[in-house]
Image (cartoon, rainbow, N blue to C red):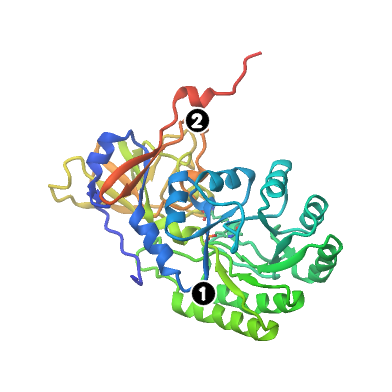
């Protein structure tokens, strides 16, 4: 596995197919995913007993189908995600559960699906235990515990500590076990997820906290989950977490629990970003090149309606120019600001948290050249919107050297479907 990210600023092909060819076939902007990268990333995690893909990162049915064939099970956080998993061929229940519903609330539809399909629940609030117990007493249950600390690549992706709404507060575990007992629910799993895009130091603190919680629950526990959160390099020079070391820490926790309980304990990991981020590219076309004082702007046809991470978190994504001429001519590099088409100043791909615009060194480019945004597979398409009445982009999967359309670009008719003029 590579240890650091390196991102060329010229990109002529994606997974062996020329960008220009893809752009001719699909209207920009569109997302492209490299299937081989997803399969490789799932394979990296094979030391864990179960890889449970957090589909919120990228939930196209074709991606779920690919993930399923690569041997990973799936996490779901809504009725829609449960339906997606079922539609992609996952069985509703089994051992280990092919689907788990992980959330802090049930809405009517998700509770109904959980009840009728016998879907395993990872409860993130005492109320969920109560509500599940009322409609499905006697089930097995996992508890998501908030250990009282958390960490993420942004404060907005930190899911632990008392500022976070996620999970069952660690000091309320005893009370929750009594609630579960009251309904005959057996707590068979313990889960923690402290945040997204964190680091090894914070991730490894979870082992001790989870061990303590599992010992409090006791011998009914047959499965523990390390949650997700594994980072990927988005910047030049950023590195991956040492997965061998991470597994070793968790395996140690698991083995101590097995000794305490005198039975096997399954070890799960629940990554979203790690599985899909690097597989995905957002391909855009440069539609204007203009100067504003010190800043040269490349304005492309994708905006935060397509990729919201920069405006939401000041997230950095690798950017590369894909020249219309296929890269035949050498181009000087220059500092530029890259923005989109939306009627809002924050529609900038090169910005830091707080909305401060920054420059990036990119090859000289003109209207008609393409600009490729890398590491966009996780929390890219799925966080898209119809802001400014822009259609959701098409999605394309490249598998074995061939590109497949896996989602059509929305039409105007899709945009106004359901609207009613009384
Ligand atoms: N498990 C649970 C319970 C989660 O809440 C999440 C992410 C994951 C697993 C997967 O985390 P990952 O391995 O992808 O870091 N929109 C943000 C990320 C939000 C993550 C929400 N929960 C972003 O674009 O960075």
Q: Residues within 10 Å of mark 1 (few under 14, many from 20)?
A: some
Q: Can you give x and y, in whole percent of width and height, for residue 198 in the image?
A: 53, 67
Q: Can you give x and y, in whole percent of width and height, for residue 152 in the image?
A: 56, 64
Q: Secondary structure at mark 2?
A: helix
Q: Say if residue 235 shows up in the picture.
A: yes
The residue lying at 65 percent from left, 81 percent from top is 257
Q: Nearer the viewer, residue 216 or 355?
A: 216
Q: Quadrant of the N terminus?
A: bottom left
The residue lying at 72 percent from left, 62 percent from top is 140
Q: Residue furthest top?
A: 422
- Does 335 sit left or right of 317 as displayed? left
Q: Can you give x and y, in whole percent of width and height, for residue 209 in the image?
A: 67, 76
Contact between labelled residues 2 and 1, with CB atoms less than 8 Å apart = no
Q: Which residue is mark 2?
A: 388
Q: Residues within 10 Å of mark 2 (few under 14, many from 20)?
A: few
The residue lying at 63 percent from left, 47 percent from top is 78
Q: Nearer the viewer, residue 260 or 293?
A: 260
Q: Say if residue 233 shows up in the picture.
A: no
- Number of numbered discs: 2
Q: Secondary structure at mark 1?
A: helix
Q: Nearer the viewer, residue 240 or 357?
A: 240
**C-alpha distance separating marks 1 and 2:** 40 Å
The answer to whether 193 is drawn above or below residue 109 in the figure is below
Q: Which residue is mark 1?
A: 200
- Does 225 sit left or right of 363 as displayed? right
Split into quadrants, the picture shows ligand 1 in the one at bottom right
The answer to whether 220 is drawn above or below residue 293 in the figure is below
């Amino acid at each position: 596995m590579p240890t650091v990210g390196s991102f060329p600023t010229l990109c002529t092909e994606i997974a062996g197919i020329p960008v220009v060819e893809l752009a001719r076939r699909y209207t920009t902007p569109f997302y492209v995913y490299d299937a081989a990268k997803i399969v490789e990333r799932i394979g990296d995690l094979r030391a864990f007993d179960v890889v449970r893909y957090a589909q919120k990162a990228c939930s196209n049915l074709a991606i779920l189908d690919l993930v399923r064939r690569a041997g990973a099970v799936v996490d779901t956080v809504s009725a829609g995600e449960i339906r997606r998993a079922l539609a992609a061929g996952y069985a509703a229940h089994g051992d280990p559960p092919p689907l788990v519903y992980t959330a802090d609330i049930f809405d009517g539809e998700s509770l109904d699906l959980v009840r009728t399909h016998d879907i395993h629940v990872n409860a993130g609030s005492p109320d969920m235990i109560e509500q599940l117990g009322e409609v499905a007493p006697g089930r097995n249950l996992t508890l998501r515990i908030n250990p009282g600390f958390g960490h993420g690549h942004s404060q907005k992706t930190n899911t632990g500590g008392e500022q976070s709404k996620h999970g069952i507060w660690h000091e309320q575990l005893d009370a929750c076990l009594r609630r579960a007992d009251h309904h005959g629910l057996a707590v068979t799993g313990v889960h923690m997820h402290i945040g997204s895009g964190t680091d090894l130091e914070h991730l490894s603190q979870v082992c001790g906290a989870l061990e303590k919680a599992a010992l409090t629950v006791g011998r009914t526990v047959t499965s523990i989950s390390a949650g997700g959160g594994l980072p990927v390099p988005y910047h030049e020079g950023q590195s991956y977490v040492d997965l061998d070391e991470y597994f070793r820490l968790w395996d140690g926790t698991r083995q101590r629990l097995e000794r305490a309980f005198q039975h096997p304990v399954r070890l799960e990991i629940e990554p979203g970003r790690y599985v899909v981020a690097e597989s995905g590219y957002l391909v855009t076309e440069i539609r204007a090149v203009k100067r504003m004082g010190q800043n040269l702007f490349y304005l492309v046809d994708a905006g935060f309606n397509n990729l919201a991470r920069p405006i939401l978190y000041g997230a950095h994504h690798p950017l590369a120019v894909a020249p219309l001429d296929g890269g035949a001519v050498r181009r000087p590099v220059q500092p530029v600001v890259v923005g989109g088409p939306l009627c809002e100043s924050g529609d900038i791909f090169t910005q830091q948290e707080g909305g401060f615009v920054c420059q990036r060194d990119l090859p000289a480019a003109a209207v008609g050249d393409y600009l490729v945004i890398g590491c966009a597979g996780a929390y890219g398409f799925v966080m898209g919107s119809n802001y400014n009445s822009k259609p959701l982009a098409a999605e394309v999967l490249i598998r074995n050297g061939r590109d497949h359309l896996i989602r059509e670009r929305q039409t105007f008719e899709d945009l106004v479907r359901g609207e009613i003029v009384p």
